[in-house]
Image: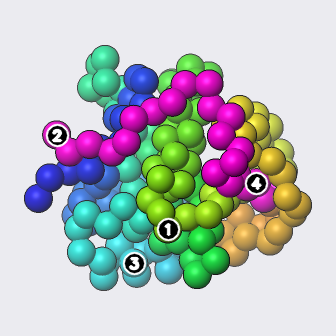
Amino acid sequence: MTTLVVPTPRLDLVLQRPEEVLAWVASLPPEVQTELSPAWMDRVRSTPAGNPWVFSYAVVERATGSTVGGCAFKGPPDISGFVEIAYGIDPPYRSLGFATEVAEALTRFALASGRVLSVRAHTKRENDPSGRVLEKCGFHQVGQVVDPEDGLVIRWERGPAEDASPSPTTGPQAP
């Protein structure tokens, strides 16, 4: 089986295999493990490898080969054509524009799939940097919602007509 890779100008988003995701979860401190969505963990354990909507992606800086963060869809597109993205960049690699590349690449991948009409994301109210990332990627605030894991959050959305990205990414590739 080939590995799904979603490229950006400087990064490769590499789809993880189930065993890689489970090993990563096992490496987390117990207090962080308890914050993971039980529904997501059930999907990871029961879904065959290669599903781009279930498994997380390692964010790899192409120039160095270093893993600089992770990202994922929070599940497959729903019946209304919505999908939610999540991303995180490790502290030493923040403020380099990587989060913007990741959010844009996941959004473009989703919208190009033919299954997604709108991409969602949410930020905690106090997370201004993540909000700025989403604004740069053409998302707009649509209100506040209660997220089961994060509590009261700001919801963001972007549809296909809101393509505001200054640097297009190419489609997914298999190495």
- Mark with earlier residue (2, 1): 1
Q: In the image, what residue type sits under mark 3?
A: Arg
Q: CA distance from mark 4 to mark 1?
A: 19 Å
Q: Which residue is mark 3?
A: 43
Q: Position of residue 107 (x, y in %)?
A: 55, 48
- 26 sits left or right of 131 in the view: left
Does residue 128 sit above or below 118 in this rendering?
above
The residue lying toward the viewer, choosing from 44 and 121, is 121
Question: Is residue 85 visible from the viewing direction of this image?
Answer: yes
Classify the position of the N terminus by image quarter. bottom left
Crowd around label 2: few <14 · some 14–19 · many ≥20 (10 Å): few
Q: Position of residue 101 (x, y in %)?
A: 53, 32
Q: Which residue is mark 1?
A: 115
Q: In the image, what residue type sits under mark 4?
A: Trp
Q: In the image, what residue type sits under mark 2?
A: Pro
Magenta residue span:
154-175
Q: CA distance from mark 2 to mark 1?
A: 24 Å
Closest to the camera, between mark 2 and mark 3, is 2
Q: Is residue 161 magenta?
A: yes
Q: How is the image coloured?
A: rainbow
- Mark with earlier residue (4, 2): 4
Closest to the camera, between mark 2 and mark 1, is 1
- The label on residue 156 is 4
Asked if the residue at tag 3 contacts the one at tag 2, i.e. Cβ–Cβ closer than 8 Å, the answer is: no
Q: Residue at x 49, y 68 (%)?
A: 115
- The label on residue 175 is 2
Q: Secondary structure at mark 2?
A: loop
Q: Secondary structure at mark 3?
A: helix
